Image (cartoon, grey):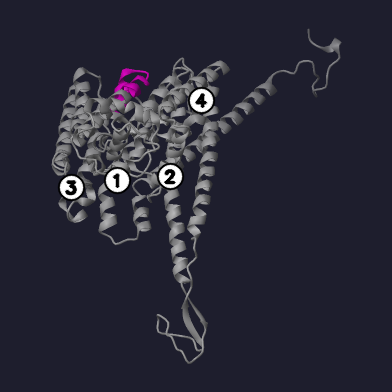
């Protein structure tokens, strides 16, 4: 079954011959049985999350500063961490089984729909009540919001270091870093801040979680509206809203990538319908978190492929500029917003992790340290009267051991800018290549996923919550490869957390080896998916070339079989009087 047409909008009837969409038809499961199965799965999912709540409750750990998985006594030897791993894997299987039942139901009855809602909403409620045990970023959000809306300071200029006595500074860990999220996030986050106030840490944390829950529901509605029929709409909405990784990262940990996902999905919906609001909505997502600015060429290529007129493109550009100016104006401060954003982003990305960029930098640093240690000592000429043994107990005759003066600047410090520029250049080339495939008619959803994954691999440190917008776009158009990655990446990204504790605290490995191991859960699946996408694109291209060649050959044979008119037997022109009337 070929990709569904996008409708009468800008993308018209674009399709991708290489992408076979997962069908939205019934697999033959009776509706009543499917509804009962969904309720049972929902009960299992809620039970699993309730067990996790018993271990990682928000209220039980509210005074446990910087509580995290690695704070569990005994680390991975603890039955709690091992149980967490098993529960995460089990919840991923429940999610997969729920999708299979929903897809297989003969009819999308009210009971089936209620079962699907229970399977998504029940775990969501429990996740709101979990402590952000996977990452403490939400506490950094809270100090930035308090700076802006309580102390009336510009968080791009002033850090929370001046307010360390404030109780909000205690659970945060980047109090001396300028805000590195966009002004649109700051503006939208005013709503939960105004409702909950900034007097109590737990109350504001709950408000941000509930706000994220609302954004998740809106994103699921937009994903559903993207589909061409209701069955596909329910499947797509479930694929996003019931995803345990999305729930854990968006509600338990409270990451603002949920807001990014919402605006990316709505921008794609506007693009599909031929609206000039597509690029402005993408601009809003980039003003929340600048990562999605990389999707600009893909959107532009899609508009050009869809024969969008120059007027529509100009209108989109003007509206995007207006949105950017309106969002930045309250915090502009004569350009200090840009300086603070760049400085904060640079400081936030200093930490080592599992992206290709970060692993390359860590490897270069490790080689530099090895080189420095191997040349730390040298033998120098010395009179025989003053013997000095080497650390190994051996000294060549007539030489003594002296320590080299370490260089003032390390090689890695010199290489780091070149590594980053090299990866930035590589990403630019690959992203433009992906945009070109969209201009040639490739599905825009696939291009958005590929570009987002490449950006995370080549230009960031890469964390599990970066997958939230990717999962949202994968839910828009679910093909076989995308579904395999969706379910596999969900389970692996959840398993990453307990395995992180094991690798860091129970193995004794150096940091690079730890991160290489953890890359198996995030980096390797991304690379495998992109490699499969490349192979599929190449196979599809070869099929297109072969089809064209066969068609050309058939047309040539058809022309050759037609009777020659105006020519003799040997093909020479006939005199006019010999031609047939």
Residue 521: x, y in percent?
Answer: 33, 47
- State which region is magenta: 220-238
Instruction: Decide if residue 389 is on the left or right side of residue 97.
Output: right
Q: Mark 3 points at which residue?
A: 83
Dot 2 or dot 4: first in sequence order is: 4
Q: Name the residue under label 2.
A: 346
Question: 10 Å neighbourhood of mark 1: few (<14), some, or many (≥20)?
Answer: few
Q: Nearer the viewer, residue 213 or 551?
A: 213
- Residues at marks 2 and 3 touching, judged by CB atoms closer than 8 Å: no
Q: Which of 246 and 335 is in front in this view?
A: 335
Residue 292: x, y in percent?
Answer: 43, 33
Q: Mark 1 points at which residue?
A: 173
- Look at the numbered disc 3 and give the secondary structure of its residue: helix
Residue ranking furthest to the top:
581
Quadrant housing residue 126 = top left
Dot 1 or dot 4: first in sequence order is: 1
Q: Which of marks 1 and 4 is in front?
A: 1
Q: Nearer the viewer, residue 109 or 200?
A: 200
- Look at the numbered disc 2 and give the secondary structure of its residue: helix
| Structural distance between the alpha carbons of marks 1 and 4 | 41 Å
Q: Nearer the viewer, mark 1 or mark 3?
A: 1
Q: Mark 4 points at which residue?
A: 302
Dot 1 or dot 3: first in sequence order is: 3
């Amino acid at each position: 079954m070929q990709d569904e047409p996008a409708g009468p909008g800008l993308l018209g009837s674009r399709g991708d011959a290489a992408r076979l969409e997962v069908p939205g038809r019934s697999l033959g499961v009776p509706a009543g049985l499917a509804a009962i199965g969904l309720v049972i799965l929902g009960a299992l999912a809620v039970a699993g999350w309730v067990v996790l709540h018993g271990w990682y409750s928000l209220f039980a750990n509210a005074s446990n500063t910087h509580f995290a998985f690695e704070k569990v006594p005994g680390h991975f030897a603890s039955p709690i961490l091992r149980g967490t791993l098993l529960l995460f894997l089990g919840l991923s299987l429940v999610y997969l089984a729920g999708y299979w039942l929903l897809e297989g139901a003969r009819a999308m009855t009210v009971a089936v729909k209620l079962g699907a809602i229970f399977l998504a909403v029940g775990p969501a409620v429990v996740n709101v009540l979990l402590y952000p045990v996977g990452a403490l970023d939400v506490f950094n959000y809270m100090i930035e919001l308090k700076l802006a809306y309580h102390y009336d300071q510009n968080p791009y200029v002033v850090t929370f270091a001046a307010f360390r006595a404030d109780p909000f500074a205690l659970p945060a860990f980047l109090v001396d870093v300028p805000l590195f999220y966009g002004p649109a996030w700051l503006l939208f986050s005013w709503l939960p801040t105004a409702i909950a106030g900034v007097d109590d840490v737990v109350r504001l944390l709950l408000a941000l979680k509930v706000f994220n829950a609302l954004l998740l529901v809106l994103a699921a509605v937009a994903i559903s509206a993207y589909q061409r029929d209701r069955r596909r709409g329910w499947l797509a909405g479930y694929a996003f809203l019931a995803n345990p990784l999305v729930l854990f990262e968006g509600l338990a940990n409270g990451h603002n990538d949920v807001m990014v996902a919402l605006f990316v999905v709505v921008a794609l919906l506007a693009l599909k319908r031929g609206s000039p609001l597509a690029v402005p909505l993408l601009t809003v997502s980039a003003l929340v978190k600048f990562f999605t600015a990389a999707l600009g060429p893909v959107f532009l290529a899609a508009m050009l492929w869809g024969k969008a007129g120059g007027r529509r493109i100009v209108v989109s550009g003007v509206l995007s500029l207006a949105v950017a100016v309106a969002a930045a104006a309250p915090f502009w401060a004569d350009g200090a917003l840009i300086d603070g954003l760049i400085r904060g982003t640079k400081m936030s990305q200093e930490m080592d992790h599992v992206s290709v960029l970060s692993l390359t930098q860590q490897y270069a640093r490790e080689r530099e340290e090895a080189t420095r240690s191997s040349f730390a000592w040298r033998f120098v000429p010395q009179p025989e009267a003053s013997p000095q043994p080497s650390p190994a107990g051996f000294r060549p005759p007539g030489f003594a051991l002296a320590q080299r003066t370490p260089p003032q600047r390390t090689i890695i410090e010199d290489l780091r800018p070149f590594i980053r520029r090299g990866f930035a250049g590589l990403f630019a080339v690959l992203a433009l290549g992906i945009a070109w495939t969209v201009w040639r008619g490739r599905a825009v959803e696939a291009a958005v996923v590929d570009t987002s994954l490449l950006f995370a691999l080549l230009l960031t440190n890469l964390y599990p919550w970066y997958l939230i917008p990717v999962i949202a776009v994968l839910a828009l158009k679910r093909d076989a490869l995308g579904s395999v990655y969706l379910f596999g990446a969900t389970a692996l990204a959840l398993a990453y957390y307990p395995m992180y504790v094991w690798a860091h605290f129970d193995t004794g490995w150096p940091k690079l080896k730890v991160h290489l191991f953890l890359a198996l859960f995030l980096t390797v699946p991304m690379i495998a998916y992109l490699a499969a996408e490349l192979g599929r694109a190449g196979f599809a291209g070869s099929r297109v070339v072969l089809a064209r060649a066969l068609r050309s050959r058939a047309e040539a044979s058809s022309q050759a079989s037609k009777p020659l008119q105006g020519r003799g037997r040997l093909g020479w022109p006939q005199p006019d009087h010999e031609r047939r009337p």
